[in-house]
């Protein structure tokens, strides 16, 4: 391995791997190390939220999750009736309609990591295991702009003595993992531009920076178990949220390969008391489950994994140092697992960071855009901690049965539904910054449902050239490009077509146009900022060849025309559609508008045709740089 | 390799590989040989019809086709206007609504073969290449019931001297392929129970049996080419059916990887005249295309494959010998490629044969069921030849322009639409036989849209246990099982639930019940005949645990309950549904009925509850055998 690279990723869990995928895809020289000799293969996180699958789709790997994972269709709430007997009180969809084009899926973390690793490997980046960071220093006389010196220890992989079927292997109730190798075969020192600590709740990177997680514990502990159950509870292949009258609560999450994930409330701790890892066992977890489920029965002939954890919420609100060292994932936020957020928010952290790092490394953007990482993601983490604090306590609380005191199950369920857009990951909205424009009533009028700072939502549209019904957001692939989405309106109207042609002409030729200014001379016209066009008029109204070249640029060595950048909003032959303008809140007979979308699919601005080039110039000139390598 | 096996498959094209998949999946000892040293990688067939994808789905590989292939959404007809200028005259969907849950897709034959090979390999069967059959003899004193002795020559793989980019490599206009190896390294003799010749239009197997293809040639030749075109024709990423005024016809089929398949009319031959292979070239094909397309332009910077072929239709109406040797695919029917039928009908041939052969080999059915193979598939081939005869001549004919004589384009298009169910492969209907019951008005009344002899069509249903919206036909996996589909009706009604319970009780316990009689004592209750249940009442009407055990049998070592055999006909949360009883034409408030489905998804019978066990006993006792190995 060379003793220098541009980005060092410490930790190859979901956050580190997602960052590795992004950087490898964008051609950044990166290394990703992990002190563990092997990847986890079972247990741990399993919820994959809609927004996460949208991101996986943008890397071309959503279908693997959909194929192997179990889609959660329904949530059933079991509560005690007035006699204290458990009864199903209501059933609701697990993913609310119109949340996303994808659904909430569950699949064990090990497989999610496999998909990320395959994706990263395909782009030439591999995890280096049994490597532990030893020191991190800033050098002012940095060689070639790589001011960070990191010393790495190559470890001798030891046989891991713990039982992988036990969740205590890598659990949060034991402070050091058993069996981790300790002897060092060699050390190396590398010089890097950036370091990202994706090294979990006990982050080494965080400690080097002198930052710490702050928060508290609820002094409640739960068991978690992946098993194949035999039960006479009427529901076990849908999500079951169950509060017993006074034996505690339980969550059932049906999983892939006929597994079922059980979260089982077990007991409380005195303030300051530590859970004794040695006294925990799968049998204890099952006993607790039986008490809660009674009179229903439970047998678990096969248990794949189990663990015990304490409920607590902790956050570190500073996540970067000199814009050179960053924290992502559990390294700056930890909480309880039941809402299925941890793995997702962690990957979304590094997804937010990846394209910005790549642009800074490659010199296509000013490194100041890296400041938006902390601003955007700490706020998400803060909301997560706040949500989990409330949610985990409601989940562990005794329900109000008949006249008794306790938590109102109606209130609990109402919160569940209210929070669903947030827990799906699709509710995230970034504040105005260098790369998110301010909003205004005039902008809202142009596209009433396109929210600046939120991700660009999908609508079914029809591909002009091949008549394929297409989820519009599927075109927002993760390749580092910005996108201009032209809502071209009714191009059957010659005046409107002329307006579109004029806009494209200015975007292509004006010296101040960012497309003209930041696209290298020999690069394809869509290689920095890609134009996607959506007409409100149907395909029959105008032949493909009548569209301006910017909307169907000639690409590659043979200058083939592109056929996948122009779409119409009309009903497809077999797959619906025809509601995109309505869905986006754009007037189909109006003057149209332009939506600027970041490489991570978040809406950066909404613009009218007339001032579009000038506004884009102002926006991009604030951070884009010329002469970088694509 | 052992010198005996149960089935020898000669030829590893689509027909042979499909048979290999089936036999390997069902645990039959088979070998599959091919004289060629390598698989094709480009060109050749490319149309994958809906019914074919349904079968691929039943083996778990439909998604690979859908991912890599190009779905054809639209057909545009270009015809000369009254001045002779080419104009698009109409646009229609390529797959008519309600044809199938799948769509017509195009993907090159080499990839289809890859998927089949991967599927077959996963079940332990591999293609043996560079092996050629030398002789085939029947021995009366056959050892262990393997009466056929086949001598095989192992060939020395020679460097294939032909250009794979040229379609003349394995074309129909040269009688022997260049570069095929001719030296033999060794010979072996094997004794087998069955031989299936999937060895193409020049079938060695067919010649051994003394059978021949009969039919004629149209004395018209066409070129075919896979290229990446640059053209100003407004449509090139949808299917284009184009008749020029007097320069011939052309078909454009947009393909995967930005390829476009062109079929281009080139010329006519005198009766008896042979096309000279040496004079053919890609340039000649492109020249013909330009003449037809004029005034539109065509450049092809990249050509992946091309070929030239004569239009003709030939059939061999005898496809088996002593119920021991069979022909499948091109070995008994050849025709022109433009309707995308050949590869599909060929795979459907061997799909029809596979489960019957497996049952005969394993002793679970009387070999007399093999007689139904020829009866069922020769009729399909006959229809194919008849269709192609008419279709290819209409395609090659001069259109009637203005007042001139010629083929009516309205008539051509009407035939196109009319034949679409047939060309999709979903129109096939097998006649009554040992394994297809007679129909009757009473049966039609029970399920008005379920046609005995046709495949069981899919409807969206809701899985009782997990609330997943499910395509019902996805449950008809190719694993050799027969299925009883119980339309249970409204089980919220206690009387109807009792009727279902009584039926299940009889099916489980009556000595004459085929489930009781033909399921080996220690096998799971669903292992020979699987019961699928569809209620018209919603999931909330009856808890899962209230269904009879036959409908959710306990399986495997740990006796886990099954969760994927009971469905309800109701609207799902997010995916529609709720129209299955209407779609099948079964009265949701009526007494219900039972549909018997063959292992290849064709409907064998429709039964009322009351006489169900007796009728099933009669049906199965005619061919099922006890004591076979599953």
Image (cartoon, coloured by chain):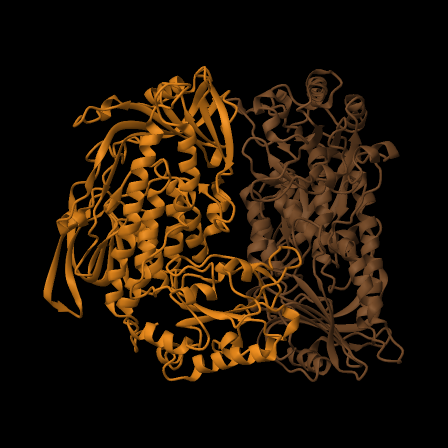
Chain colours: A brown, B orange
Left or right: residue B157 compared with residue B486: left
Q: Position of residue A170 (x, y in %)?
A: 67, 65
Q: Answer whether residue B38 is visible to the viewer in this image.
A: no
Q: Position of residue B163 (x, y in %)?
A: 30, 30
Left or right: residue A385 compared with residue B158: right
Question: Between residues B465 and B399, which one lies in front from this camera angle?
Answer: B399
Q: Position of residue B74 (x, y in %)?
A: 51, 36
* Residue B181: quadrant of the picture: top left
Question: Between residues B187 and A502, which one lies in front from this camera angle?
Answer: A502
Please give the name of the residue rendered at 28% of the width and 22% of the height, measured from the top-left corner: B267
Q: Position of residue B348 (x, y in %)?
A: 34, 52
Count of all numbered marks drawn on residues in the image: 0
Q: Is residue B166 above or below residue A223?
A: above
Left or right: residue B507 compared with residue B276: right
* Residue A401: quadrant of the picture: bottom right
Question: Between residues B85 and A412, which one lies in front from this camera angle?
Answer: B85
Q: Is residue B432 above or below residue B345?
A: below
């Amino acid at each position: 391995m060379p003793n220098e690279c541009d980005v060092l990723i410490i930790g190859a869990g979901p956050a580190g791997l997602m960052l590795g995928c992004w950087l490898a895809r964008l051609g950044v020289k990166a290394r990703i190390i992990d002190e563990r000799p092997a990847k986890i293969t079972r247990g741990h996180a399993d919820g994959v939220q809609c927004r996460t699958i949208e991101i996986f789709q943008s890397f071309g790997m959503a279908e693997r999750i959909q194929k192997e994972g179990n889609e959660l269709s329904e949530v059933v709430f079991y509560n005690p009736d007035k006699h204290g007997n458990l009864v199903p009180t209501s059933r609701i969809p697990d993913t609310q309609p119109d949340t996303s084009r994808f659904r909430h899926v569950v699949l064990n973390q090990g497989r999610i990591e496999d998909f990320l690793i395959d994706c990263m490997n395909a782009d030439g980046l591999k995890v280096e295991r049994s490597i532990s960071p030893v020191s991190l220093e800033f050098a002012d006389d940095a060689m070639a702009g790589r001011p960070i010196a990191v010393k790495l220890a190559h470890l001798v992989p030891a046989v891991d003595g713990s039982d992988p079927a036990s969740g205590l292997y890598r659990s949060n109730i034991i402070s050091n993992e058993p069996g981790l190798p300790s002897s060092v075969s060699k050390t190396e020192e590398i010089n890097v531009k950036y370091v990202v600590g994706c090294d979990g709740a006990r982050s080494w990177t965080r400690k080097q920076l002198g930052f710490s997680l702050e928060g508290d514990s609820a002094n409640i502990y739960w068991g978690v178990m992946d098993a194949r159950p035999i039960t006479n509870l009427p529901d076990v292949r849908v999500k079951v949220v169950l509060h017993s009258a006074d034996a505690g609560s339980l969550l059932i999450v049906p999983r892939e390969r006929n597994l079922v994930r059980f979260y089982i409330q077990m007991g409380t701790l005195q303030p300051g008391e530590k859970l004794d890892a040695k006294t925990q066992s799968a049998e204890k977890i099952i006993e607790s489950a039986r008490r809660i489920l009674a009179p229903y029965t439970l047998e678990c002939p096969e248990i794949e994994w189990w663990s015990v954890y304490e409920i607590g919420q902790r956050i570190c609100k500073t996540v970067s140092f000199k814009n050179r060292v960053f924290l992502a994932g559990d390294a700056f936020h930890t909480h309880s697992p039941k809402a299925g957020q941890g793995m997702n928010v962690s990957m979304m952290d590094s997804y937010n960071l990846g394209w910005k790092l790549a642009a800074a490394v490659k010199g296509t953007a000013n490194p100041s855009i890296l400041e938006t990482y902390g601003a955007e993601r700490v706020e998400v983490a803060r909301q997560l901690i706040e949500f989990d604090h409330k949610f985990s306590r409601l989940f562990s609380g005794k329900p109000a049965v008949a006249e008794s005191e306790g938590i109102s199950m109606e209130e609990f369920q109402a919160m569940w539904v209210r929070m669903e857009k947030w827990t799906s990951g699709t509710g995230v909205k970034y504040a105005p910054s260098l790369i998110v424009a301010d909003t205004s009533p005039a902008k809202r009028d142009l596209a009433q449902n396109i929210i600046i700072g939120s991700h660009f939502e999908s609508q079914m549209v029809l591909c002009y050239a091949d008549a394929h019904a297409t989820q519009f957001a599927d075109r927002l692939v993760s390749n580092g490009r910005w996108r201009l989405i032209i809502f071209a309106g009714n191009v059957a109207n010659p005046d409107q077509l002329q307006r579109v042609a004029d806009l494209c002409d200015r975007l292509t030729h004006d010296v101040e146009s960012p497309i003209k200014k930041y696209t290298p001379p020999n690069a394809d016209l869509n290689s920095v900022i890609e134009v996607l066009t959506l007409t409100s008029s149907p395909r029959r109204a105008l032949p493909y060849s009548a569209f301006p070249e910017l909307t169907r640029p000639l690409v590659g060595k043979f200058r083939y025309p592109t056929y996948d950048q122009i779409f119409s909003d009309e009903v497809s032959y077999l797959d619906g559609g025809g509601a995109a303008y309505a869905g986006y809140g754009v007037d189909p007979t109006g003057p149209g508008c332009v939506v600027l979308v970041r490489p991570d699919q978040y809406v950066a601005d909404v613009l009218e045709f007339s001032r579009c080039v000038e506004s884009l110039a102002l926006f991009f000139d604030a951070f884009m740089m010329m002469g970088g390598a694509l």
